[in-house]
Image: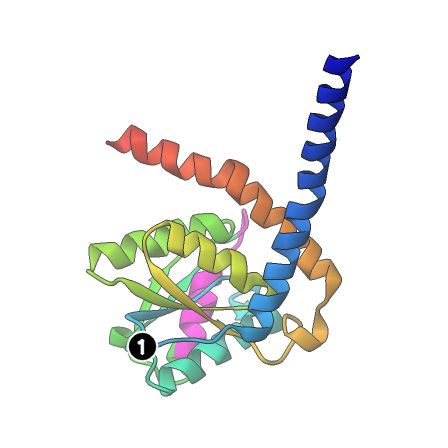
Amino acid sequence: MFLFKIVRRIFSFVLLLAIIFPLYVAGSIWWCAHHVGPRPSDAIVVLGAAEDNGNPTPLLAQRINQAKLAFESGLAPVIITVGGGQSGDRFTEASASYRTLRAEGFSKKQLVELPVGKDTLTSTVAYVAYMKAHGWHSVVITTDPYHCYRAMAEANDLGVKSSCNPVMQGPGSLGATGIRYITRETGAYLAYKTVGQFGIHLSDQVKK
């Protein structure tokens, strides 16, 4: 009987944690989206989103525009575009962003194109590796507000100081998103912390 009570209490505690921790993460994602802001850094990164035959979709177009505003504000001297493509695509997410910025007057010296990354984590690994190779230590991440929390966590965990430059308009903005985006990001963040982050550290150990 005594053992049963102990087991029941342990189970209840674990169940409570399983409820409280996701709620804490969801709250952190919401708070970050409403209070985050960019800081002067070594580089600005535009996280990839879908492109259409080399043309940015509305979601990606807003990220590009927000990165442009950050650059013009003097937050960093270079913009990194990142993101791979789907099988059969002629262009990548990174190239769509890069081509758009070039068309708007940015020089090659002001831009870096990294056409890799199938998701936020692999894109982050790619641009952080590039930054470290060039002695850069801080980044302004341009993405959707509710995406900032996870994107910053991944960059910070990889050793780069990050701030976020959230889009203000378009389909990824606060006015156009809500609980579904927060729910998705909560699951993605928990998956990263339980599986994705472990995979990065395991990879590092193999390299060493």
Q: Is residue 206 visible?
A: yes
Q: Is residue 116 magenta?
A: no
Q: Residue at x 41, y 77 (%)?
A: 101
Q: Position of residue 162 (x, y in %)?
A: 39, 64
Q: Residue at x 44, y 35 (%)?
A: 199
Q: Residue at x 76, y 24 (%)?
A: 8
Rendered view: 32 above or below 25: below
Report the side of 34 relative to 112 (left or right): right
Q: How many marks?
A: 1
Rendered view: 150 above or below 3: below
Residue interval drawn in magenta? 86-101
Q: Position of residue 137 (x, y in %)?
A: 27, 62
Between residue 156 and residue 44, name the one nearer to us: 156
Q: Position of residue 14 (x, y in %)?
A: 68, 33
The C terminus lies in quadrant: top left
Rendered view: 26 above or below 54: above
- In the image, farthest residue toward the right: 1
Between residue 9 and residue 109, name the one nearer to us: 9
Report the side of 36 relative to 114 (left or right): right
Which residue in the protein does label 1 denote?
A: 76
| SS label for mark 1 | loop
Q: Amino acid at mark 1?
A: Ala
Q: For residue 7, which quarter of the picture?
A: top right
Display coloring? rainbow
Q: Is residue 91 visible?
A: no
